[in-house]
Amino acid sequence: MTTFLIRRIVQMIIVIILSSIVAYGLLYLAPGGPMVEFQQRQMGGGRGLSQADLARIRARFELDLHPVTRFTRWFVGLPRGPITIAGQTFLADLQVGCAVPGQVRLRYPDGRVEIVEEGCDQPVTMADLEGRRVSRGILFGDFGRSQVIARDQPISTLIWSRLPYTLALMGVSTFLAILFGVLIGIYSATRQYSRFDYIMTTVTFVGASLPSFFFGIILILVFAIWAKEAGLPYLPPGNATANRNYVVPLLGTVTAGSPLDFLLHFIMPCAVLTFINIAQWSRFVRASMLEVLRQDYVRTARAKGVREQLVIVKHALRNALIPFVTLLAGILPTLFAGAAITEAVFNWPGLGQLLIDSLNRFDYVVAMALLYITIVLQLIGYLISDIMYTVVDPRIRLT
Amino acid sequence: MATTTPVVTVDELRSPRAEGQWAIIFRRFRRHRLAMISLAVLLIVFIASVLAPWIAPFPRDQRQLGQTFVRPMTTNAQTGQLHLMGTDQLGRDYFTRVLYAGRVSLTVAVTTATIAVALGIILGLLAGYFGGWVDIIITRTLEFISTFPTFVVLLILSAILIQNEALLPIPDVAVRGVASITALPEREARKVTLLVFVLAFLNWTPTARLMRGMVLSVREQLYIESSRALGASSLRIIFKHVFPNAYPPIIVDYTLLINTVLVLESALSFLGFGIQDPTPTWGNMLTVAHSNMFNHPWVPLVPGLPLLICSLAINFVGDGMRDALDPRLKL
């Protein structure tokens, strides 16, 4: 078990490093970014930015560093500057980037002139890095600062401010989905081919294939718009809380920001996510239960005269839930990343919405932080599920 | 050799029920009434969207001033033409756009699924059949890709790539092909092609895993060994013996993947990261509908219902195929 854990954790770290490189490379490739705006301003003939201004802005976003240096500074917060050992400084002249790229005029035989960036007019050395702001490294939980969405705010503050909303939404809906999913799954399996089973398999089948955003829109249509028009109690269609008090029939005036207000806003997105997830869980439990109910030990238990309820709960369910553990591993990242689509439909201020915002507004550092956290959580989820296997099923040994 | 071989006449050999595998599958599939209805619905939608340039009553992007959000089934006061599904925020005919959107959405779904499944089949076959380092490389790649949260990566990839077309060079042949299938101008088709590649790249892994599993079990069968003993080449064994015995679950997988991609594409376009206006898809039409639904509650139903119907129908067909292909299930 110990060797297994050590090996898995080493593997995990390697995968984390690899996927961070891939994730960083992905977003590094993206042009967009903060410079586009300035370049456009320059080309638009507006108040021109001097070469020095541009260099300063590039330095602020670390765009003047080589990709590798940028990556290591983002990932582990190094290098910070020349290394000083016993009063001696090393590597002060090592070039780590380029502040002003050199330009070479190419004159072709046919008279065309092209300016190509080549070499470097003004290199950035290790000594220049001294005094620049740098995060402690994403590996150690410092995600750096947001560039666009909340200017200069640490990304962790941004994430913390959104996290409660996502956790509430995902936590409650996942809990409800598992609860109902397991109950429906058991009931369907014990009464296979009954009317209940038939209806439930159809409903869950529809739920699994439904595009969630359209389902959300339909809910808004029915419970927010039509219900309001019909003078029935209605639900607010978006956001987590209202800006001003509003009147709902039967409930009276709802104070903005009160728990009731939050609850009313919470119901619809939660219902969408629950419904979609119930489908997955109940299908899974049903299949697993059907498999187990066919086993000999279930027949033996029944033959012994054990009460049917007890057979189902103690003999069948416990064994049927073993494969369940793998699915539980998938919960961890979804709890965090939330459901971007549902959050977008209901304008829920969670992390999924944050991801969409950051991509829309080229705040790639935020997107990278979110992607990174999701990947790490997913890996932790896999590890937990492997360990859980041994707990649930003693026959499985990890070596 | 003490066993006696029973004498069989030629007539007996040709059994009266010499129906092929596909005939059996289709016979079993026909029993699934919902699947048959779904197939019919899908065919109608397909044909309607293929015929879009001929049956659409208006040009795709024609705007009519002052005719925004005209209710369905009303006639245009100026021209006397019927707007079957009303008009959108710019006064473009919804029925026309739904037809063209179907063409784009379904093309993306089918081509993506086909590319992804083909890729998955090839890699799965290689990994399962050859084992060794080929298997290690392919399965490690699979595992690595599966550590990425798919939808998050999909959002990021399409956000970056779709907005910067020059980043990923795609062959002009592919663009022209997509342009001719979707009836789009080439500039718009380029983005669609890009999205197809991104989606295919992220969706081949389940097929590869499934195929590898199937090949692993088929590979151990006696008939593979005997054909190897007869001197068949690896290529022949793979295509003549392994693949025909391993592909049935892939068909179901393929059908369900079409639906997954259809929903993914519309979700991406809905969020504004996939295909964007003026190219119509059901997803990006829903974005406009979503922001205007308070004043015009009927609007989301126009692009939403075709999407919902197609998604359900594809799923039911997949379900029917699953039942038809499952030899343990008596139909």
Image (cartoon, helix red, strand yellow):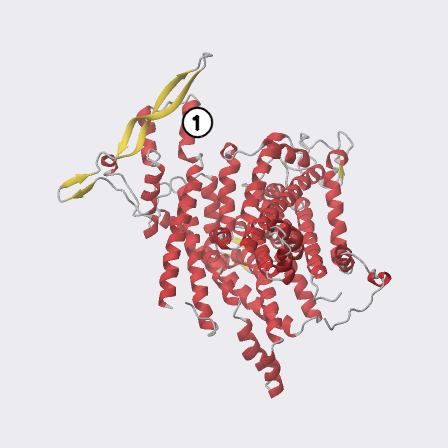
Quarter that holds the N terminus of chain B? bottom right
Asked if residue A247 is positioned above or below residue A131 in the image, the reply reads below
Q: Position of residue A280 (x, y in %)?
A: 58, 61
Residue B137 visible in the snapshot:
yes
Which residue corresponds to the image point at 56% horizontal and 41% vertical from the top-left?
B197
Q: Name the outermost residue toward the right.
A: B11
Q: Name the outermost residue toward the bottom.
A: A304
Badge 1 element: helix
Q: In this image, A128 relative to A105: left or right?
A: left
Residue type at the position of mark 1: Gln
Q: Name the outermost residue toward the left.
A: A87
Q: Where is residue B269 in the image (x, y as percent from the top left)?
A: 58, 42
Of the pair B243 and B199, the residue shown nearer to us: B243
Quarter that holds the C terminus of chain B? bottom right
Q: In this image, A67 relative to B296: left or right?
A: left
Kindly indicate the quadrant of the structure image that contains residue B210. Answer: bottom right
Q: Where is residue B123 in the image (x, y as percent from the top left)?
A: 56, 49
Residue B293 visible in the snapshot:
no
* Residue picked out by circle 1: A40
Q: Position of residue B321 (x, y in %)?
A: 70, 57
Kindly indicate the quadrant of the structure image that contains residue B227. Answer: bottom right
Q: In this image, B233 relative to A259: left or right?
A: right
Asked if residue A316 is positioned above or below residue B235 in the image, the reply reads below
Of the pair B242 and A95, the residue shown nearer to us: B242
Which residue corresponds to the image point at 61% horizontal and 71% vertical from the top-left?
A291
Q: In this image, B23 relative to B184: left or right?
A: right
Which residue corresponds to the image point at 64% horizontal and 38% vertical from the top-left?
B280
Kindly indicate the quadrant of the structure image that contains residue A234. Answer: bottom right
Of the pair A63 and A338, the residue shown nearer to us: A63
**Number of residues whose C-alpha sits closer than 10 Å to that of mark 1, classed few (under 14), some (14–19) or many (20 or more):** few
Pinpoint the chain carrying mark 1: A
